[in-house]
Image (tube, rainbow, N blue to C red):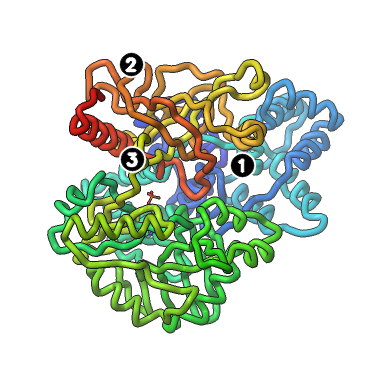
Amino acid sequence: MQETPFKVVVDHFIQMEDTTKRTELTSILAHLFNSVKPSEIDKVIYLTQGKIYPDYIGVELGVAEKTIIRALSKYSGLSEEKIEDEYKKLGDLGDVAKNVVQNKKQMTFFAQQLTINRVYGVLEKIAKTSGKGSQDMKLAYFMSLLNDAEPDEAKYLVKIVLGTLRLGVADYTVLDALALAYAGSKDWREILEKAYNLSGDLGLVASTLALKGIDEVKKIGIKVGRPIRPMLAERVPTAKEALEYMKNGCIAEYKYDGERVQVHKSGNTVVLYSRRLENITMHYPDIIELALKNIKANEAIVEGEAVAVDPDTGEFYPFQELMHRRRKYGIEEAMKMYPVTLFLFDIMYADGSQLVDLPLTERRKILWDTVKKDERVQFATHIESTDPKEIENFMDQAITDGCEGLVLKDPASIYRAGARGFSWIKLKRDYQGELADTLDLVVVGAFYGRGRRAGTYGTLLAAVYDKDSDSFYTVTKIGAGFTDEDLKNFPKLLEPYKIPHRHARVISKMDADVWFEPRIVIEVQAQEITLSPIHTAAFGLIKEGAGLALRFPRFTGKIRDDKGPEDATTVTELIEMYRNQKKKALTNGTNP
Ligand code: AMP
């Protein structure tokens, strides 16, 4: 069979960019899957998400804007200044590329049609070129594609290499589309999701399905070196309510306020993954050393929270200090100033055995046997108790010790990768005169400021996440809590996610001045949750014609780079917080 032309992919991209409906997006994607060869499907999935490998591989195309400007200049014979002018006018280099190719194409005759395989192959070469002079090599590779590209192909090639392709295709949309395209029985969707949860690689799941069938997908399991999508905790307001879910007893553990780390050890090699499955090995050379020294198994996957600890006092540093580890240079100094302690709480794999389906009590025993404890590698502090009073006291202790609260766990529960459920329940601290908890909100838009904020954003439009509809619902406009530095930084931080109209997965009644792809998550503290006719979160669920909104919201200073947009506070959690606050107000005799 002949290779599929790249044009087929591009035609679908154009349709995807045109739609604002998620169901439509899914069916266009399913149609695309059906239009390519089984051996091409993984490549198509990566490209649709604007990458060439799953995130955990950590390989980037690394093409500079300037390189593309040079390529377009070379191709067209126009000066680089002229290309830059066009870029300023159109605001997108993809559109510039499209015009440039359109104008030239009328004069050329011989072009060899681009195929998916050829495009992907060249992109791989571009990604693998690094070091001195690499931009010139990358430019040459890119030109080889550009010379044979149609106008729209050129546009999307530029968007892919610059990382500005924003089709809004979330992982769940890909899974839905796969199930739709290969339409087996209803439980296929679940099987696909499970394979994805254990492998963290949509391309692998898709190509296994397309080439070998669903029975092989069922066999996709855990492999050291490939991140597992983390199990997540539900939230309830009180220990008493949490205990109602704990039918098999309860293990209460400290909830450390650090960075979640999945440690993969194989022989002398250690790889670390974040909660969002990024490869963060580079940030924690100290954890590598600790893992090699303390993990007794030859092969293992363990999970815990890395917390920065003051070497002088043993006190925990606030979460922000860990962010010093997220930079490229100066890790050595950060390591000295903010050494981490690893608090382990789970094990998923050890020497050939997949452990996720064992009950928590057994996994913990294996964890304790597999890892040697010392000052810097510890097991999460815990008690076993079903007495709400005792748990509340333990919670106070956790907070005094610098933790965020507790995670209550069902001792009989399995490790459900990628799932948020009630076998893990988080209890967080109760601030006086404030909402019991902060919210993690996704920035979806902005409004221009006035006065001191003229020329920058005055307020940000922020949203909560709803898993069922896989959409983001607005809950507040936030302008307080930003330092002068924040005000300077936010436009820069948000610039790469600017889009010309409301994102397909954002549900808003407000018309923001600027829209963003839902990507950046910020932590927000508020005084109260109120009913509001203008925000769409939980709209009509509590009261007809009203959604939920925040009163006196304030940015806490934390940008949650460790959370993806789908990890933000959910509509369900927001409703829970609203109900809880109402209950409290009633017992205090005040009107909510
Ligand atoms: P949240 O980020 O508010 O959704 O809370 C869940 C997070 O708490 C997890 O992703 C972990 O990073 C963190 N955490 C801290 N201590 C524990 C623990 N003992 N068990 C599970 N998760 C923990």
The part of the image, by quadrant, that contains residue 446 is top right
> Disc number at residue 436?
3
Q: Secondary structure at mark 3?
A: loop
Relative image position of residue 128 (x, y in whole percent): 67, 59
Neighbour tally class for label 2: few under 14, some 14-19, many 20 plus, Cα within 10 Å = some
Q: Nearer the viewer, mark 3 or mark 2?
A: 3
Quick one: quadrant of the C terminus? top left
Q: Is residue 529 left or right of residue 387?
A: right
Marks 1 and 3 close (CB-CB < 8 Å): no
Read off the residue under disc 2: 533
Neighbour tally class for label 1: few under 14, some 14-19, many 20 plus, Cα within 10 Å = some
- Which residue: 65% across, 50% down? 61
Amino acid found under the numbered disc labelled 2 = Pro
Q: Nearer the viewer, mark 1 or mark 3?
A: 3
- Which residue: 70% across, 58% down? 329
> Disc number at residue 224?
none
Amino acid found under the numbered disc labelled 3 = Ala
Does residue 213 show up?
no
As measured in the structure, the alpha-carbon distance from the residue carrying label 3 to the one carrying label 2 is: 24 Å
Judge: label 2 CB < 8 Å from ligand 1. no
Q: Secondary structure at mark 2?
A: loop
Q: Nearer the viewer, mark 2 or mark 1?
A: 2
Relative image position of residue 585 (x, y in whole percent): 24, 30
Decide which of 347, 193 is in the foreground and name it. 347
Amino acid found under the numbered disc labelled 1 = Gly
As measured in the structure, the alpha-carbon distance from the residue carrying label 2 to the one carrying label 1 is: 37 Å
Vertical comparison of 387 with 143: above or below: below
Read off the residue under disc 1: 163
Q: Secondary structure at mark 1?
A: loop
